[in-house]
Amino acid sequence: MAELSPVCKVCGTPLSGIRAIPPRVLRGVRRYPKNPNMCNICSLKQLKGEIAEITVLFADVRGFTELTTDLGPMRTKELLDEYFRTVSDILFGQDAIVDHFIGDAVVAFFNQPIQHEDHPARAVASAREILHAVTHLNERWKLPEPVGVGIGINTGFAMVGTVGSSDPKDYTVIGDVVNIAARLQGQAAAGEILVTHDVYEKVTPAFPHAPQRILELKGVKKPVTAHSLH
């Protein structure tokens, strides 16, 4: 498991060690499940919602549906749980919010509420680490057919906050930036990271000759310029 920050990265409240005892006792401070590097009090402050610049990452497992028949639901769940823990640790290490698990997909976003100017680069670094981690999981699992992961990443402005409730567990993002990231993930092959041109502009020095693709995405009016990273 990735090493967690001893203090909340938003407000600086101690989250581990002796100094964390008074906040826990007096204010009920604890780590926030969607990112344990921040506290639940800071998550409550995000309830109202705002338009913010973020980077969104969708990562979907390829091949698990077919394996369910061979492995059975319980063994499949064990492998998915291990995969989700591994991916979550990677994303937490880059200060992302792990928004949702949808079937065998992970949805995460960067730059809110823990802010970093290089959030697109953090998303790409997370994606590459996820692909590397899946290679090691496959080596250990020794499945009849190795699984792969396709990843889509987009950056832009979205509404960030809770939707339909006042529960901080419902803290999420809404907007075209999210929809396009989801559609890119659907187009990505196993082992491929598809990013929009806006993301690519932020990481070009690391991928100077990344192949370009013009994609017609469902629900998106204009063609989207994407770049394929590995």
Image: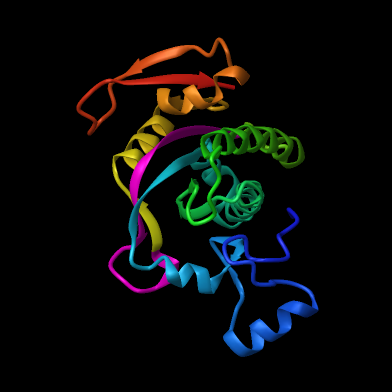
User: Which residue is located at x 53 percent, y 14 percent?
Assistant: 210
| Residue positioned most to the bottom | 26
User: Which residue is located at x 58 percent, y 85 percent?
Assistant: 27
- Residue 27, compared with residue 62, is above or below; it is below
- Residue 186, compared with residue 22, is above or below; it is above
75 and 35: which is toward the camera: 35
Looking at the rendering, in which quadrant would you find the C terminus?
A: top right
95 and 62: which is toward the camera: 95
Q: Is residue 77 left or right of residue 174?
A: right
Give the colour scheme of this rendering. rainbow
- Residue 188 in view, yes or no: no
User: Which residue is located at x 33 percent, y 57 percent?
Assistant: 50
User: Which residue is located at x 40 percent, y 14 percent?
Assistant: 213
For residue 160: magenta? yes
Q: Name the chief secondary structure element in magenta.
A: strand
In percent of width and height, residue 207 lies at 59, 17
| Residue positioned most to the right | 18
- Residue 50 in view, yes or no: yes
In percent of width and height, residue 111 lies at 50, 48
In percent of width and height, residue 102 lies at 43, 51
For residue 227: magenta? no
97 and 186: which is toward the camera: 97
Looking at the rendering, in which quadrant would you find the N terminus?
A: bottom right
In percent of width and height, residue 202 lies at 51, 26
Q: Which residues are magenta?
A: 147-170
